Amino acid sequence: MQLAINIAVLTAIYALIACGYVLIYRVSRVLNLAHGELMMLSAYLLITTASLFSKTPFIALGAAIFLSLCVGVLVYLFLMRRMTGEMVLAAVLTTVALGVLLRGLVVLIWSAQQQNPAQALGWVNHSLPVFGGRISAAGAALIATTALVYVGLFLFLRFSRYGIRMRAAGQNPLLAAQRGISLHVIYALAWGLSTLTGALAGILISLDSGLDSTMVLIGLKAFPAALVGGLDSLVGALLGSLIIAAAEVLMIYYVDALLSDVVPFLVLILMLVFRPWGLFGTREELDRV
Amino acid sequence: MSSREPRASGYFRSSYAQGLRLLETRTQWTALVLFLTALGIFPFTATSFQLDLACQVFLAAIGAIALMLLTGYAGQVSLGHAGLIAAGAFTAGILFKEFGAKFWITIPAAAVVGALIGLIFGLPSLRLRGLYLAVSTLALHFIVVYLGGEYETKRGFSTGILIDAPRVGDFIIRDRKIWYFVLLSFAAAALLISLNLLRSRTGRAWAAIRSHETIAEALGIGVPAHKLLAFVISSSMTAVAGALFGYYRGFVSVEAFSLFLSIQYVAMIIIGGMGSLLGAILGAVFVTLLPYVIEYAVAQLPNARSYAGMLAAFNYAAFGVVMILFLIFEPQGLVGIWRRVQNYFLLWPFKQKPLGGGRK
C-alpha cells in the first residue's frame, strides 16, 4: 500500500512539472530545458515572501506564485521573444543557458545551503494515515493540486477564448497570426502558465522535503514523463508521469536505490526507439523537398 | 567551410587540387610557421599556472573539435558529450586499476570504447532528428554516468579512481612541460584528422546531410552510414580526450562529468561559431579561460574575501549570460567576428564582396 501511495505522490509531482513542458512545447515547439531551474527559483521566491509576510502564510504563498507567473512572462518578453522564428535548436539552447544563469543567481541571492520553506511559513508537515499507509500533508496537497491544475488546464484550453487561441497558435502559427491572434501574447501566456504550474510543483516539493539545487534534477527527470506521454498532449503527460513514477519507485524498491536518477531516462530511450512521438503525441510531418 | 573561401583578395584557383589545399598563400604559410614557433617557445617562458591553462585548453579543444564535427558539420545535435568524456576517462581508469594496463593500451582502448558508445549514441539518430535526438543523447549521458558511478561504489572507489602518471619505458610523463607537448600533439592530430575528413568525400557527405537529409539521400549519399560514422569518429576522439583528461588529472570521478560539462562543450561550439574548426578552438579557449577571468574579476571587487565562497555561482551566472548574449547577438560566434574583421581588411576600401552571392 505504501508503495502505491509513493507512486501516486511521485506521479503527481512529475505530472505537475510535465504539464509545464507540454504547455510551452505545444504552443511554440520550444523545449524549455530551464523548467527545473524556474521551479527552483519559485521555491526560493517563497522563502523571500515568507520572510516578508511572516504572519500570513497564505499571502506569502500567493505572492510567490504570482511572482513566478511574472517571471515566466518576463522570461518570454526579454529573452525568448528574440528567439521566436529562429531555429528551434537555438531557442532550446537559450533555455539551457537561462537555466545555467538561474542556477548561479539563486546561489548568489539565497546561498547554497539547504532551506526549509515549511519552517519559514511556520507549517509542520504532518504525516497522515491513509488506507494502511502514510502520506505527508504536502504530498496530499501535491496530489490535490495536480488534479486541480489538470482539470483547470483542460477547461481553459477547451472552452476559454485564450485557451482556444493557444491551441490554434500551436497548430498553425502562421494561420493563427493571420486570423488576428497575437502570437507574442499567446506565447507569453504559455510561458507564464508553464512557470506558474512549475512554481506550484517547486513550492510543494520544497514544503515536503526542503529546498536546494537538487530540485533541478527533479525537474529534468519529469521531462521523460512529458515525452513518453507525447510532448504536445496533456493527457499523455499524466499517463507518462504514471509510467515513469511507477518504474522509478518499483526499481528503487526491488532493485537498487542508485537507479532512481537513471530509470526515467532508460524509459525515455526505450520510448524514443519504439515510438518517438510518444503515446498520445502527434507525429511530426514528413520532410518534403 | 571557411578555408574553402579564397583568402587572398581575388580568386586565383585554376584546378580542383588547388581548391583542396589547406594552405593557399605565402602569408598563410608564414602565419602557420610563426604560430607553431610561438607554441613551441611558450612552455619555456610560461609559469606553471599558465602551462596548466594551456593543457586544459588543448584537452577542451580536442573535445570541442569532435563535437564540432558532429554538430557543426554533420548537423547531429548531441547534449551527451560529457558522457563520452566520462566513458574515455573511465575506460582508462578501469583498465589501469583492474589490469594495470599501460598508457599505449588504455588510449587506443578508450578510442575503441568511444567508437562503440558512439555507435549506440548514433543509433537513435537514424530515426530521430533535432530536438528528439538531443534528448536521446541527454538520456544516454545519464546512463553512462550512472554506470561509472555504479562501478565506483561497487568496487569501493567511492571518492574516485586514482591513475598513475603514464609511463613510456622508463620515461614518466609528469612534468607540465612534457604534458604540454603531449596534449598539443594530440590536439594537433585531432585537428589534422578533422581537416582531412572535411575536405574529403566524408566531409562533403556530412555537409549535405546537414543541409537537407532527404536531398542528400536522393543524391545517393548513404545517410545512415554517414550519420553513424560522424557519431563514431566524434565519440572516439572525445573518449581519447577523456582518457587523456583522466591521466592529466591523475584522478577519475563521476562528479567531474556532470550535465554542466556537456553544456560547456555545446557552449564552446556556439561561442566559437558553428561549422568552423577554428571556431571550435576559439570556443575551447574562451570557455576554458572564462572561469579564471571571472575569478580574477571577482578578486578585484571590494571586500573580495566575502565572495570567495560564491565563485562557483558567479561562474554559472556569468557563463549563462555570455551564452545568452552570443546566442542572441552573435549567432555566428567568435569566428563570425573574426571573419568580419578579416573581410574588412581583405576588401578595403570596399565594403562588399565584389563577386559571388553577397554576404556570407
Image (tube, coloured by chain):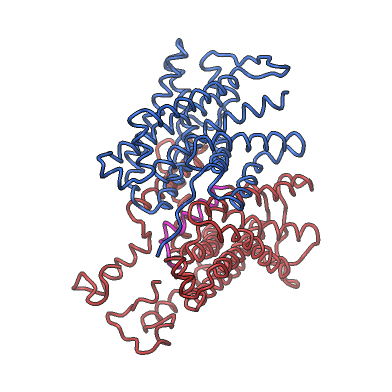
- Where is residue B38 shown, x and y percent of the image? 46, 72
- Residue at the bottom extreme of this rendering: B14
Q: Nearer the viewer, residue B6 or A261?
A: A261
Q: Nearer the viewer, residue B218 or B173?
A: B218
Q: Is residue B270 magenta?
A: yes
Q: Nearer the viewer, residue A207 or B174?
A: A207
Is the magenta region chiefly helix, strand or loop?
helix
- Residue at the left extreme of this rendering: B349
Region in magenta: B259-277
Left or right of B173? Residue B198 is left
As drawn, the chain in blue is: A
As drawn, the chain in red is: B
- Residue at the top extreme of this rendering: A55
Is residue B99 positioned above or below B28 on the image?
above
Q: Nearer the viewer, residue A43 or A141?
A: A141
Residue sitting at 51 percent across and 59 percent down? B50
Q: For the C terminus of chain A, which image quadrant?
A: bottom left
- Residue at the front extreme of this rendering: A159
Residue sitting at 20 percent across and 69 percent down? B351
